[in-house]
Amino acid sequence: MKKIQKFPCAGPVHSSSAVEVHLPTCRKRTPFLLSSPHSGRNYPREFLKMAVLPMNELKRMEDRFTDQLLEHAPENGLSLVQALFPRSFCDVNRDWKELDASMFSPPLIEKDLLLSKKVSAGYGVIPRCVAPGRSIYRYCLPVEEAGHRLSRYWEPYHEALQLTERILHRQFGFTILLDIHSMPPLAQTRPCDIVLGNRHGKTCSSELISLAETLFSEKGYHVQRNTPYPGGYITGRYGRMEQNRQSLQIEINRACYLNMQTLQPNRHFTKMQQDITHILAEMAHSYSVPQNETE
């Protein structure tokens, strides 16, 4: 496997009210960067005034508590960027142009937007729905709301992700971004606990995805690749193998660690957290050698 090179220690990354960044000390740092874009639980007051759905329905759109599953990863040298705001408010795993023009008054100019299947279904960068037929809003949003959410929430998340990734790339010469999500139980006969997505081989090497599959399988989890989740916007944007920048999306079955009715941690939560911590540490160790840099 490729080993890290020695690079000067870079400066710190600062968090904001929208994003939290955990960057390990230079001595502990590895080339791995974790992205947790859908685990935010800080609901802006103005958003709740606009929404007509009850809080329990908005919460079902979260990748609930994935940030807590990852909270020990920085101790093992993996950097972590996490959104503090909810996915139902702004989805940073979408291109900023994936906006539904009809959601706003006056309507946005459609020629400037990206009309994807996600947008048509109501799941753009500013979601219209939490589920099919379950609209978040009764009326159109003020057009200024689009700019507000993009500039105050979408942009800071990606700025933090880009800056942290650049720091790691400068230090090691290569980076590996793991975009962490949770998924509802899949409607299939074959059990599935983990879906690994690399855009069908476009964003990370077969070596990396095989390592992840092996480590999860050794812990007893059922793993499948790229179906039905091959990797979203973040995976595609930050996976540039020709630049020594790899990315891999990891989807975790919520039933493995949550009570699906109450959305609270179940009795397996601690084990899942320990398993994730161990697996990520093993992945980082496989691509790292001891560092001699000082702070």
Image (spheres, rainbow, N blue to C red):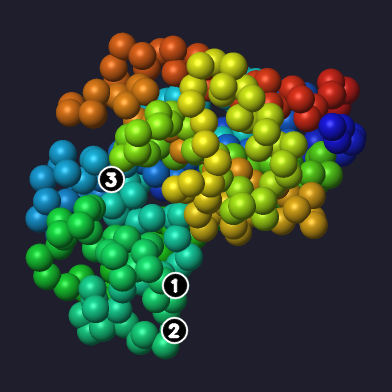
Question: The N terminus appears in which quarter of the rendering?
Answer: top right
The image shows a total of numbered marks equal to: 3
Residue contact between numbered discs 2 and 1, judged by CB atoms under 8 Å: yes
> Where residue 162 appears, x then y in whole percent?
63, 53
- Mark 2 vs mark 3: give the one in front: 3
Q: Nearer the viewer, residue 43 or 78?
A: 78
Element type at mark 1: loop
What numbered label is drawn on residue 152? none
- Figure quadrant of residue 129: bottom left
Element type at mark 3: loop
> Where residue 265 appears, x then y in whole percent?
29, 20
Q: From the viewer's perspective, tell me whether residue 260 is left or right of residue 36.
A: left
For badge 2, the amino acid type reads Asp
In the picture of the structure, the residue carrying the numbered disc 2 is 112
* Residue 32 at least partly seen: no
Q: Earlier in the sequence, mark 2 or mark 1?
A: 1
Give the distance between the C-alpha atoms of the residues marked 1 and 3, in whole angstroms. 21 Å
In the picture of the structure, the residue carrying the numbered disc 1 is 97
Relative to 57, does residue 98 appear above or below in the rendering?
below
For badge 3, the amino acid type reads Met
Give the residue at x 61% y 48%. 198
For badge 1, the amino acid type reads Lys
Label 1, residues with CA under 10 Å away: few <14, some 14-19, many ≥20: some
